[in-house]
Amino acid sequence: MKASLNTQIFIAVIASLLCGLTLQQIDIDSSVYKKTIFVCGIIGNTFVDLLKMILIPLVFTSITVGVAHLRHHHNMHQIWKTTLVFFLFTSSIAVFLGLGASNLFHLGAGLDIHLFDTELQKFNTQSLTLQEFTSHFFHSLFINPLAAMVHGDILAVVIFALFLGIALIVLAEKAQTILNMTEELLAIIMLIVNWIMKVAPIGIFALLTKLVATQNIALLSTLAKFIVVVIGTTLFHGFVVLPLVLFAITRISPLFFFKGARESLITAFATSSSSATLPVTLRCAETHLKVDKNIAGFVVSLGATVNMDGTALYEAAAALFIANLTGIELNLLQQTIVCITAMLAAIGAPGIPSAGMVTMVMVLQSVGLPAEAIAILLPIDRLLDAVRTVVNVEGDMIGSLVVQKLTKLNQ
Ligand code: ASP
């Protein structure tokens, strides 16, 4: 009997942990180590490439169709508003948790910045002020859709698809052929997603083996307290706060949710990319969590680029960590600025690996912290990125369930 996809993915995770830990014991200059990491890199990247290959057509068609179909539901405005309120509400909680944990555990205090001299010297950061970030952000919203698709600018594709979906609502029957075509394209792409998922266990195995094998244990242990607190708080948000919000609003049990969501959560962990995971997330939301296709198409696709609770939490916690490390005391006003910029940074960060590190520079600079300090965080980012991406993706799926419930669809 063939094991289900979930079981195969589970086996892949366990096997990758074992292989990764075994590789940790091998000399990194040995040819076995180098070859294994090389092969894992090729296989893992191919899996990510497959997901990225269908990403743009998927985002484009799912949002267009999702929005266009909202015309059948008389509460279109409510869906919009509920989605945005939910995104803001949960990411505010995340930012407060990040700041709270940093304050509570005095992250960074007691560590000597000179421990990181080598990292700091190697690093040469490009500054990104709040003004630059804001103008760059607005400039990236409205782009020629073909250019956006070619360059993989997801946010711009999302926005064009929103326009198209709304236009299809306005034109109704007059544009039925285009809507039918887009629907057919979406069905075709979802079929391809199902094919890609067949190789997901192999891809996840390769990505995780490389992740575990290449962690720099020495550096991880220097920053152990920071890592444990950040991961712990992120998991608290993902496994306590978000499921509580879900249960309070929808009465859906966390068990049902995690069972339905796990393919996507594991893929998010392995790829560290909400965007690359989007095809899997949409599939989980629709097939396992039974979210209305139109709601999922809209909420999950939009959420993959703008709703990042894990990133918001991390940016706030890390900013305070750097402040403590460099001996700079942040007052209440400065902490409030950190909250706001961390949320903006999470909205603006694309769903790709370590995107949060780039926008982190802006958060640091907003309160006068040295941007070079992210050189300390970069070497440990692969692991933290994996965890925060899981929570980013989880927030999108929970969002779709909450929006579905609050807007009373399917009832
Ligand atoms: N990797 C994260 C994501 O794709 C973004 C980040 O770096 O925080 O969701």
Image: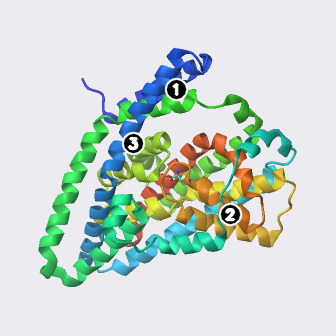
The answer to which of 263 and 137 lies nearer the viewer is 137
Q: Quadrant of residue 355?
A: bottom right
Q: Residues within 10 Å of mark 2 (few under 14, many from 20)?
A: many
Label pair 3/1, CB-CB below 8 angstroms: no
User: Which percent across, then down, holds residue 317?
Assistant: 70, 55
Q: Residue at x 46, y 61 (%)?
A: 305
Say what amino acid the circle numbered 3 marks.
Val
Q: Residue at x 49, y 74 (%)?
A: 139
The residue that mark 3 highlights is 48
Name which of mark 1 and mark 2 comes first in the sequence.
1
User: Which percent across, then down, holds residue 314?
Assistant: 64, 54
Say what amino acid the circle numbered 1 marks.
Leu
Name which of mark 3 and mark 1 comes first in the sequence.
1
Q: Secondary structure at mark 3?
A: helix
Left-right relation of 18 to 313: left
Left-right relation of 364 to 396: right
From mark 1 to mark 2, how far is it between C-alphas? 34 Å
Q: Quadrant of residue 10?
A: top left
The residue that mark 2 highlights is 363
Disc 3 versus disc 1: nearer the observer: 3
The residue that mark 1 highlights is 17
Disc 1 versus disc 2: nearer the observer: 2
Say what amino acid the circle numbered 2 marks.
Val
Q: Residues within 10 Å of mark 1 (few under 14, many from 20)?
A: some
Height in image: 333 above or below 320?
Answer: below
Label pair 1/2, CB-CB below 8 angstroms: no
Height in image: 67 above or below 12?
Answer: below
